[in-house]
Image (tube, rainbow, N blue to C red):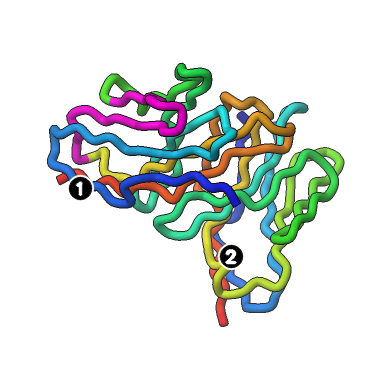
Amino acid sequence: EPEVTQTPSHQVTQMGQEVILRCVPISNHLYFYWYRQILGQKVEFLVSFYNNEISEKSEIFDDQFSVERPDGSNFTLKIRSTKLEDSAMYFCASRGPGSSTDTQYFGPGTRLTVL
Amino acid sequence: LAKTTQPISMDSYEGQEVNITCSHNNIATNDYITWYQQFPSQGPRFIIQGYKTKVTNEVASLFIPADRKSSTLSLPRVSLSDTAVYYCLVGPDNYGQNFVFGPGTRLSVLP
């Protein structure tokens, strides 16, 4: 069964450093999303991406964040100048162009720890 | 986006059927109802989605009454491995639309 993959599974960084989280969506999917989940809290939407541009973004997704689909298979989330409060699980999701009952499929997540 | 309300937690025993009900009183005509399961430190996993009446797959059933103001996820004969958080999500079938997750229902299956 096709699945969304994410790398790395765990990223540790120093405050102020830049990190890039990588995702490989399901191959025929066209819509991509990033969510995050701070430990013990709800899953929060960050951004959605379609046709090489951002479709929607939340208040969390400020200038510190950017997304890119550099090569047709990877989908990345860059966090510039990380802060302690960026520590969280980051989930990538993708959705296909299929039937009206299609939905978002989530990856296993990257645990980001900012020290 | 329609607001959803579901119990914060539920306990069950192995082998029992578990029903988790979600209220979504202001559901819109073009909204679908989707349920996800999440284990600790893992991504949400799609369980089932429906629009009206009953939907069944190999994992669960979803019951939606005619007014669509609520829905019930039914898990037959739960096992310890079904211990997880279950999220009810309501939203339009719009590819750009993000999901708004609530706190979900924490299901604990006891031996």
Does the segment drawn in magenta span residue A81? yes
Q: Residue A93 location in percent, x, y?
A: 50, 38
Q: What residue is disc 2 on? A: B10
Q: Which amino acid does label 2 sit on?
A: Met
Instruction: Give coordinates of residue B30: x percent, y percent.
Output: 74, 27
Residue type at mark 1 is Val
For disc 2, the neighbor class at 10 Å (few under 14, some 14 to 19, many from 20) is some
Residue where numbered disc 1 is placed:
A12
Numbered range of the magenta stretch: A65-84
Q: In this view, does B96 lie above or below A93?
A: above
Chain under callout 1: A
Front one among A76 and A33: A76
What's the residue at 48%, 32% (across, down)? A33
Q: Is residue A89 shown above or below B79? A: above
Q: Mark 2 lies on which chain?
A: B
In this view of the protein, which residue sits in the foreground, A66 or B28? A66
Looking at the rendered structure, whether the residues under marks 2 and 1 are on a common chain is answered as no
Say if residue A89 shows up in the picture.
no
Q: Residue B9: within the magenta?
A: no
x and y, in percent, of residue A17 in the image: 15, 34
Left or right side of B111 for A60? left
Judging from the image, what secondary structure is the residue with disc 2 in?
strand
For image coordinates 26% across by 44% down, the residue present is A87
Image coords of residue B84 (percent x, y): 52, 62
